[in-house]
Amino acid sequence: MPTITLYGGAGMIGGNKILLEDPQADRDSRLFFDFGTTFKTRDLYFEEYLNPRPGAGLLDMLEMDLLPPLEGLYRPDLVSSGEVWERCRGRPGYREIDSVDGVLVSHAHVDHTGYISFLKEETPIYASALTAFIAKAMQDSSMADFEKEVCYLNPRAPAAEGESAYLRTARESYRQRPFRFMDVPALGTKAKEYWESSPRKRKEIVTAPFEIAPDRVGRLPVRYFPVDHSVYGAGAWAVETSAGWVVYSGDLRWHGSAAEDTKRFIHEAALLKPRLLLCEGTRIPKDYEVSEAELENHTERDVFDRALRLVRAERGLVIADFGPRNIERLETFLGIARETRRKLVILAKDAFLLEMMGLVSPSVPGPSNSDDMLIYKDLRYRVEPWEEGLREQSGSRLLSARQVRDSPGDYILCFSFWDAKNLIDINVQGGLYVYSSSEAYTEEQEMDFERLRNWLGHFGMRSVGLPYAKRQSISALPEDEQGLHASGHANANDIMDFVREINPRTVVPIHTENPGYFLEHLKDTDVEVAIRDYGGSLTFG
Ligand SMILES: [Zn+2]
């Protein structure tokens, strides 16, 4: 009988790593739904200046429970000695796994993709083309980091005697992971060229063959459904096991611009009469009381209307703070920029991401196809390799701090806390900071908010939508500051309706801090709710 095991996303938001195994002879297959970074566990031990050591490879990751102890699943080049696995063998959940047939990725958020970095390089990765291109653009434009080797890996070798690490970077070429693109009929020439390109001139990449729209993973028939979420290219999955269909929601909503996709998915998933549904519950609050504000589904249109009103009333500089991969939000502010005769100014890194997304989805707005978009030229010691082409092509599209200073009222800058240093170069007083980002945040972010408020205070900027006090949730903001963000997730009520409509025999809550809510609110249905902790399994016939 098939089994699922939760190695992440159990009783917590993010870090999904869900193993599905079907041992039946004609189906014998094994796959993962997502393989994300478990920030919650990582934050227990690590922070900005205390990180897992690349020179220790898998040792730190396994010892501190950032990866499940599944021997055989990971890159052998990251294992410095036999001792690494020896230490794991007595641990709860330890198992040998010789291979998996693939990872079925839902979308390009790091808590769903990040730790693909550690998987054996031959593990096939199934994803939408957009998800794959976002992951590559992010990897190309990041500092080298062994926790970010999602699309291609940088091989390591044992360090020499006397070196101060166990491992060092090998002289070998980068090696690309084999991807399977689920949603495109073909890759265009430019897209293929980029997909197969190395991020560094001096280091080659060994490419892996990609495949277009396969309908099986291992021996199991699979279906991929595009859904609406806060990142483009998001999807849900269904896999036909020997005991029936298993449906995986990924992260989803149906109050964004791709709402119809989610609705189609719900309809088609219900027709499969699933045996099992793995269902997200991000917005189900920890305590059972769901407040009115938390049930509010602000739409992107609300964000547009509300933010437009605020920007219209501002004569000075405007900064809009939102996740750069949230293209819908970018389009919202691009629209606001047009309405208020401003230009939308993005960072080079975000411009690069948009241009690369545009290679597989031409409707994605970028500096090359939108006249109202400029690229901020920040102060830097050197230009990174990924940036060179972009800077060459962009020429007159580059905007300096001085130009912003000369007419701050002409721009909306897409900055976040991490870009606050640019305010020193721009050096103007006053203006408006519109915080239009995710509703959930961690204690560490609270410190960042505190610092951000100090930066804004220093430059006399007013903020809207930013939580004022410690532990204050966005839903506690005054009425005129509400609705500056549309959530990427369906609310608690919608999720319960979603389960009822798909009507599986069993639902397993994932990606939620409150799985018990499912139990409570599905009492009146025939759906069985199965709650599992980290490492817990469920066998279903
Ligand atoms: Zn997500």
Image (cartoon, grey):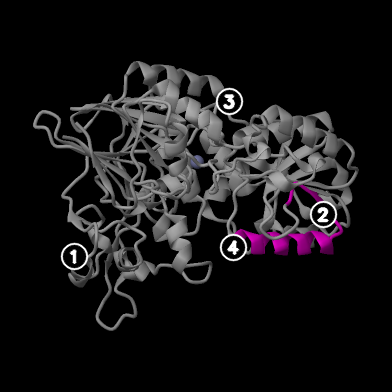
Query: Under tag 2, what secondary structure?
Result: helix
Placement of 143 over or under 98, stated as above or below = below
Q: How many numbered marks are there?
A: 4
Horizontal side of residue 444 vs 506, given as left or right: right
Please provide the residue range marked out in magenta: 445-466
Q: Earlier in the sequence, mark 1 or mark 3?
A: 1
Q: Where residue 496 appears, x then y in whole percent?
A: 48, 30
Q: Please tell me the numbered disc located at residue 402.
A: 2
Q: Earlier in the sequence, mark 4 or mark 1?
A: 1
**Labels 2 & 4 near each other (Cβ < 8 A):** no
Residue 277 picture quarter:
top left
Is residue 300 located in the magenta-colored stretch of the structure?
Answer: no
**Distance of label 1 from label 3 (alpha carbons):** 50 Å
**In front of the other: label 3 or label 4?**
4
Is residue 461 located in the magenta-colored stretch of the structure?
Answer: yes
- Please report the residue visible at 72 percent of the width from the left and 59 percent of the height from the top: 420
> Can you identify the residue that label 4 sits on?
444
**Distance of label 4 from label 1 (alpha carbons):** 33 Å
Q: Earlier in the sequence, mark 3 or mark 2?
A: 3
Query: Under tag 4, what secondary structure?
Result: helix
Q: Quadrant of the N terminus?
A: top left
**In front of the other: label 1 or label 2?**
1
Q: Earlier in the sequence, mark 2 or mark 4?
A: 2
Q: Earlier in the sequence, mark 3 or mark 4?
A: 3
Three-letter amino acid code of the residue under disc 4: Glu
> Can you identify the residue that label 1 sits on?
89
Q: Where residue 20 appears, x then y in whole percent?
A: 25, 39
> Can you identify the residue that label 3 sits on?
363
Taken as a whole, is the magenta stretch helix, strand or loop?
helix
Mark 2, other Cα within 10 Å: few <14 / some 14–19 / many ≥20: few
**In front of the other: label 2 or label 4?**
4
Q: Earlier in the sequence, mark 1 or mark 2?
A: 1
